[in-house]
Image (cartoon, rainbow, N blue to C red):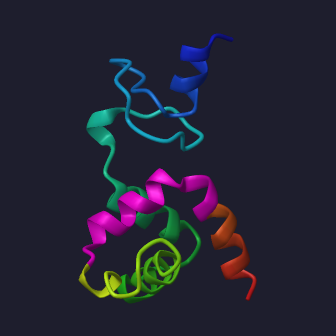
Amino acid sequence: MGEIADAIINGELDYETGEYIGSPVGYPRRAIDHNPVAGVTKFLIKYGYDTKAKRMGVIMEYCKGVFQPQHLPHTDKWTMCMAISDNWGDFVKWFKSYRSK
């Protein structure tokens, strides 16, 4: 396959418009549907994190390694989920080890 087709399949480019969305996530997506909070929430619910408190616990724990400690308490959920979405592969790898603890 070509480079553009691979980018669409991996979700780096919008599958309707070809617009750049961000880092690849492993599946095709549209820019209009790209809501990092919804994506992270759906992923965590799938693995049993069914309350907001549980999900925020995972999000905050991961983001400790992404943001400066003094900035984390002042970082909104959208920004944290955007960081997770932009580093999806790293997040999934981290999440697997986090769950196994």
Q: Position of residue 22 (x, y in %)?
A: 42, 39
Q: Quadrant of the N terminus?
A: top right
Could you say which quadrant of the image residue 98 lies in? Answer: bottom right
The image quarter in which residue 2 lies: top right
Which residue is drawn at the image coordinates 39% and 26% (left, top)? 14
Q: Residue furthest top?
A: 2
- Is 21 magenta? The answer is no
Determine the residue positioned at 55% across, 77% down: 48
**Where residue 46 sits: x, y (%)?**
54, 66
Q: Which residues are magenta?
A: 75-91
Q: Compared with residue 32, is residue 63 higher up or lower down, i.e. above or below?
A: below
The residue under the point 42% across, 60% down is 83
Residue 101 versus residue 75 in the image, above or below = below
- Residue 36 in percent (x, y) is at 36, 56
Q: How many marks?
A: 0
Side (left or right) of 65 relative to 36: right
* 88 in relation to 3, above or below: below
**Secondary structure character of the magenta stretch overall:** helix
- Residue 86 is a magenta residue: yes
Left or right: residue 84 versus residue 2 is left
Image quadrant in which the C terminus is located = bottom right
Residue at the spot x=26%, y=36% of the render? Answer: 32
Where does residue 63 sit, x and y in percent of width and height? 46, 76
